[in-house]
Image (cartoon, rainbow, N blue to C red):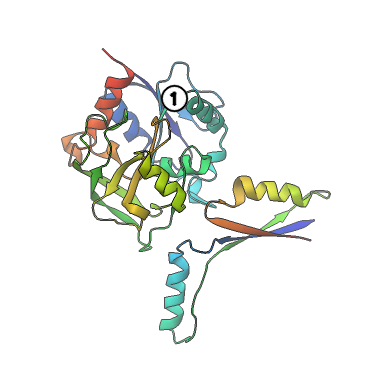
Amino acid sequence: MKARVTVHLKTGVLDPQGEAVRQALGAMGFDGVEGVRQGKVLDLDLADGTTEAQVTEMCEKLLANTVIESYTIEMA
Amino acid sequence: MRAGVITFPGSNADRDLAEAFRKGGADVTMVWHKETELPQGLDIIGIPGGFSFGDYLRCGAIAAQSPIIRAVTGFAEKGGYILGVCNGFQVLTETGLLPGVLLRNAGLHFVCRTAPLTVVTSDSAFTSDYNAGDEVMIPIAHHDGNYFADDDTLARLAGEDRIAFTYGDNPNGSLNDIAGILSDNRRVLGMMPHPERCVEEVQGGTDGAAMFRALADVLAPA
């Protein structure tokens, strides 16, 4: 089984990398990009029977820093 | 004074930090991150600068899960002293021994130069040889030194006199110009600038030497 964890910066946390991407898109002529927030995706290959609660614990303890980041989990 | 300096894969300021402790009179033991116990009788642990685990995932995040960190956390809980410099500061925030987090520099650039800092408090074993308000020149070299914490945490740090150093010329976007902070028992200091890189003239400055002298005075009274 697999899980996809998406980690993104919380609202209000400055994202200088996303801002640099937004500016680059504007410089390339892509008008109307009003904001870019950069996050990360982690695809986990899991032993059968791994629970979403266990993946949540992984997120809380390592995959995300909940001071600045939030996360979503898709089990598949 | 007995000091232990932790080395992770990717640490690069571990020997400089050990040398600065020795210059302050310490007996230094290097400790590999896979150890599960600290050497007996340590007074202080140094967590050095560098790029532990290649800064993968988040700076300091993987190092914070190293086997030795459980012992380091126990050491802190028993009132042990810890100095975390640069990547060491990032490790301390990732372990939760210090609040907040170090984000990517606001200007996105790696900054590498000598920075003017203000000593905000002399009320700690690390800063007792400085006077509050002193301006010191300490080298910085980091890509992720942009201190962030929520408003409550920032207010608590200021209210409890736990901001140790601020930047005179904020190089990275840190909130409230924060360059270094203390734990609530004032025995854990995390800072992005490198005091161990300015302890003797050959390094281009000696403004960091007072920190290691002060630690030696407090931790090994003559």
Which corner quadrant of the image does residue B48 belong to?
A: top left
Q: Tell me: A5 left or right of B200.
A: right
Q: Tell me: B180 left or right of A48.
A: left
Residue drawn at x 30%, y 56% as measured from the top left: B171
Q: Report x, y in % for residue B75.
A: 49, 25
Residue drawn at x 20%, y 41% as measured from the top left: B133
- B199 and B115: which one is in front? B115
Residue B111 vs B117, above or below: the answer is: below
Which corner quadrant of the image does residue B125 belong to?
A: top left
Q: Report x, y in % for residue B196.
A: 29, 36
Amino acid type at circle 1 is Gly
Q: Quadrant of the N terminus of chain B?
A: top left
- B172 and B110: which one is in front? B172
Which corner quadrant of the image does residue B90 belong to?
A: top left
Q: Report x, y in % for residue A70.
A: 60, 58
Neighbor class of circle 1 (other Cα within 10 Å; few <14, some 14-19, many 20+) is: some
Q: Quadrant of the C terminus of chain B?
A: top left
Residue position marked by numbered label 1 in the rendering: B80
Q: Is residue B191 visible?
A: no
Q: Number of numbered discs present?
A: 1
- B156 and A50: which one is in front? B156
Query: Residue at the top extreme?
Result: B222
Q: Is residue B129 visible?
A: yes
Residue B34 vs B174, above or below: the answer is: above
Residue drawn at x 46%, y 73% as measured from the top left: A21
Q: Secondary structure at mark 1?
A: loop
Q: Chain of mark 1?
A: B
Q: Report x, y in % for residue B19.
A: 30, 29
Residue B160 vs B44, above or below: the answer is: below
